[in-house]
Amino acid sequence: MITAPGRVWSVTLAVLVVSRVFGWRRHLCLNYVISENTMKIVPEDLFTANQIIHLRPTYGRDVFARFLDTNQFVRNVYPNFELTNELKASRGQGLKSTVEKLLSIGLAPLAERFARSFYGWHLRRKSASWQSRDEVRLEPECLKLHTSSHRIQTLKKFDSAMHRALLEIKVLAS
């Protein structure tokens, strides 16, 4: 999810609470939340590029397009990847912009500080059980919660499959 600057923690906490209340939590994986100020994703590798090309925006298609422009490495890994026409079109932002402006008057910064303090405390308390601490970022404009990442295993499997394929090609060419 990509939020407005200074809203990563409060939006994440609000979405988690609402999804739990409505029973959507089992269907929602909110493990990477960034602000529009921090749209550059690292590491720039096959795994990350694959994750990005499978994203589909539900709102804010213009932000999604800027996100892709910021992460040009995706097009180096997948040169044929392009936004489809329906993803290029953006919906109106009228009510959303008005609500954001009202919240920015004072409530949003307070909510962000509270959420960062409370949710940060909760996450740090659970950190002992994380299997891939190096894939976690708890920053003001980036909340990355890949606590049991599949990156290393997936890339190793890919490298192994490529190695076998190249050996097979050499054998066939001989």
Image (cartoon, rainbow, N blue to C red):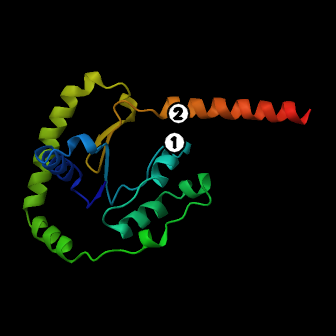
Secondary structure at numbered mark 1: helix
Q: Residue at x 10, y 53 (%)?
A: 111
Secondary structure at numbered mark 2: helix
Which circle marks residue 151 in the picture? none
Which circle marks residue 154 in the picture? 2
In the rendered view, tell whether residue 163 sits above or below residue 36. above
Q: Amino acid at mark 2?
A: Thr
Which circle marks residue 47 in the picture? 1
Please tell me which residue lies in front, 48 or 103. 48
Cβ atoms under marks 1 and 2 closer than 8 Å: yes
Position of the C terminus, as image quadrant, is top right
Please tell me which residue lies in front, 86 or 31. 86
Q: Amino acid at mark 1?
A: Phe
In the rendered view, tell whether residue 79 sits above or below residue 159. below
Tell me which numbered mark, 1 or 2, is placed earlier along the sequence. Answer: 1
Q: Residue furthest top?
A: 128
- In the displayed structure, does residue 133 sit left or right of residue 78? left
CA–CA distance between discs 1 and 2? 7 Å
> Dividing the picture into quarters, in which one does residue 148 lie?
top left
Q: How many marks?
A: 2
Instruction: Measuring from the top left, give residue 87's x and y in whole percent.
Output: 42, 68
Instruction: Measuring from the top left, give residue 78's x and y in whole percent.
Output: 59, 54
Q: Residue at x 12, y 39 (%)?
A: 118
Instruction: Measuring from the top left, give residue 162's x and y in whole percent.
Output: 68, 35
Position of the N terminus, as image quadrant, is bottom left
Q: Residue at x 73, y 34 (%)?
A: 165
Instruction: Measuring from the top left, give residue 71's x and y in whole percent.
Output: 49, 57
